[in-house]
Amino acid sequence: DVKVTQSSRYLVKRTGEKVFLECVQDMDHENMFWYRQDPGLGLRLIYFSYDVKMKEKGDIPEGYSVSREKKERFSLILESASTNQTSMYLCASSLGETARGFFGPGTRLTVL
Amino acid sequence: RKEVEQDPGPFNVPEGATVAFNCTYSNSASQSFFWYRQDCRKEPKLLMSVYSSGNEDGRFTAQLNRASQYISLLIRDSKLSDSATYLCVVRVILSGSARQLTFGSGTQLTVLP
C-alpha cells in the first residue's frame, strides 16, 4: 500500500522563523502536492510538482516555496513564518496516469 | 468564483435516510472526477471515482454531467459511520505528466441515530 509520511504531526514555531515541512512517498509517484486546510475554506493547493526539480504554483503560493530534489521527497518551506500560516498542512502524491491521490497524515502548524 | 464549489452543509440526516451532495466545477478542461471522504482530524481518502456513465459502489452512487459541469454523490440507507466531510475533487491534465487536483471545500454530513 502507498505510504505518504510527513515529518511532524504537530509543530509550533515563532513568527519570523524559517519552517521546513517534509513529505516522503514510497511508491515512485510523479506528482506531489502541498495543501493547507482551514475551517470553512477547505483544501487549498499551495504548490505541486510533477517531476524532480519541477514545480508549479497552486492557488495560494504566497509566503511559501518548495523543493523537490528527489522524486520521493517534496518539501514545503515557509521562509519567514507568520501567524496567518497557522494551519493544517497536507501532502499528497499521485501517479501520473491515475489520479488517485494518497495523503499524508498532515502537520498541524501553529505560528505564535 | 471557486474552481470547485460544494454546498458546505452541514447535512444532518437520520439513519436510513437518502442524502445527495452536489458539486459544480468551472474548468471545462477537467478530465477526471472523484469523491473523497475526510473523517474528523484525519487525512482525505478516496471514496470513489466518478464516470460519465454514472457508477455505483454499494450504497453510494456517483453521477457526472459534463455538459452542466456538475457532479453528484448519492448515499442510500445512510449509516452512523457515514458521518464525515465529503470532498468533490477534479483533476486537470496540464501538460505531459503534470496533473492538478483541485478540491472543493467539502460537505459535512452527520447521520443521527
Image (cartoon, rainbow, N blue to C red):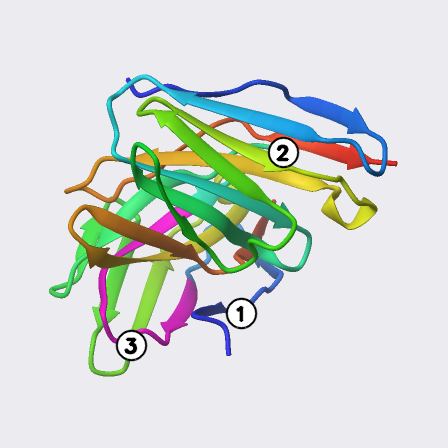
Query: Was residue A107 drawn as part of the magenta stretch in this picture?
Result: no
Residue furthest left as drawn: B53
Give amino acid for label 1: Asp
Mark 3 to mark 1: distance in Å? 15 Å
Q: Chain of mark 2?
A: B
- Residue A104 screen position, x and y as percent: 47, 27
| Residue at (27, 40) in percent of width and height | A100
Give amino acid for label 2: Arg
Earlier in the chain: of badge 1 and badge 2, it is: 1
Earlier in the chain: of badge 2 and badge 3, it is: 2
Q: From where the camera sits, is residue B79 visible?
A: no
The magenta span reads: B20-36
Query: Was residue B35 drawn as part of the magenta stretch in this picture?
Result: yes
Quadrant of res B21:
bottom left
| Residue at (14, 42) in percent of width and height | A97
How crowded is the residue under tag 1: few (<14 C-alpha within 10 Å), some, or many (20+)?
A: some
- Closer to us: B11 or A101: A101
Disc number at residue B7? 1
Disc number at residue A83? none
| Residue at (72, 31) in percent of width and height | A18
Q: Which residue is mark 3?
A: B69
The secondary element bearing badge 3 is classed as loop
- Closer to us: B23 or B79: B23
Decide: marks 3, 1 in contact (CB < 8 A)? Answer: no
Mark 2 to mark 3: distance in Å? 30 Å
Give amino acid for label 3: Gln
The secondary element bearing badge 1 is classed as loop
Decide: marks 1, 2 in contact (CB < 8 A)? Answer: no
Mark 1 to mark 2: distance in Å? 21 Å
